[in-house]
Amino acid sequence: MTIYTHTGLKYNENINNEGIAYIMKIITIIVLAFLIVGCSKQAKKPDYSNAAEVFQYASKQVDDGDFEEARELLTEIENRSDAGDYAPLAKLKIAESYLLEQEHDLAITQYKDFVNLYPENRYAPYAQYQIASIYFKQIEGRDRGYRYAVNAIEEFEKLKTLYPRNPYREVIPLRIEKSRNILAAHEHYVGEHYFKKASYEAAIGRFNKIIEDYGDYQDIADVYYLLAQSYEATNDFKKAEEFYNKTILKAQRKDLIGAAEERLKVLLKKKK
């Protein structure tokens, strides 16, 4: 039978009814497929009476970037009397979530709490290492990294003291050395500033501090040279001669050695 619709179009009733049934079947299958896929993508809700399941679920939330929800669940685990080993793990995961959000101060607070609450836990050396490393990684240079370098050295030294058998023993000395170089570079920068302003006594104080506290500073020869010039400017020719000679012995750069030799010749003529 041919039927005309209100739009003026016509179709065969028998064929269309079969087509509609077929289409509806396909639509139903597609909808069900979407529902199944959607459900599979959602993390399975945990059994909240089971600390292990809650921890696993919260850990996945951290991995997925759902930090707020994850921290709520992890905090609940911390406060549970039956959490057992999952309480310290929850504390570590909270710290990790803050670190992933670049909330460095909050992450450090959580790691410090962990070390204080669980000093004998097998992950305590890791937590202490994370504290030191967060400070270390924020060092940006001699003018902006001073505070972070101080904190990094303090926390790495604490790691060595509290956990002498920690697994980071090969890395720690290198990071301490770099942090110390940053501190020395800061003093170098300040001393050079005083030197350029002809505040030679202040410059001498800064340069001597580097020699006393950071004798292994990578640019110590440059410090010797500036110190020699500062002493020469204050007419302390004996000290000036001493540090020009030290510059010549310590320097690796030919231009610096040449400059020190020239200044020393001039100085020796002054002394005659």
Image (cartoon, rainbow, N blue to C red):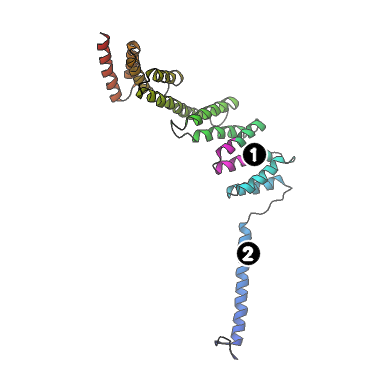
Nearer the observer, 238 or 83: 238
- Front label number (2 vs 1): 1
177 sits to left or right of 37: left
Q: Secondary structure at mark 2?
A: helix
Residue 247 shows in this picture? yes
Residue at (62, 83) in percent of width and height:
17
Q: Main secondary structure of the magenta part?
A: helix
Q: Is residue 154 above or below residue 48?
A: above
Q: Earlier in the sequence, mark 2 or mark 1?
A: 2
The x and y percentages for residue 16 are 59, 84
Nearer the observer, 65 or 240: 240
Residue at (38, 25) in percent of width and height:
193
15 sits to left or right of 206: right
Q: Residue furthest top?
A: 272
Q: Are marks 2 and 1 in contact (CB under 8 Å)?
A: no
Residue 118 shows in this picture? no
Residue 88 located within the stretch drawn in magenta: no
Residue under label 2: 35
Q: Which residues are magenta?
A: 90-108
Residue 15 falls in image quadrant: bottom right
Residue 238 falls in image quadrant: top left
Residue under label 1: 91
Residue at (55, 38) in percent of width and height:
104
The x and y percentages for residue 90 are 65, 41
Q: Amino acid at mark 1?
A: Lys
Q: Secondary structure at mark 1?
A: helix
Quarter of the N terminus within the rendering: bottom right
Q: Amino acid at mark 2?
A: Leu
Quarter of the C terminus within the rendering: top left
What is the CA distance from the residue labelled 2 to the residue labelled 1?
36 Å
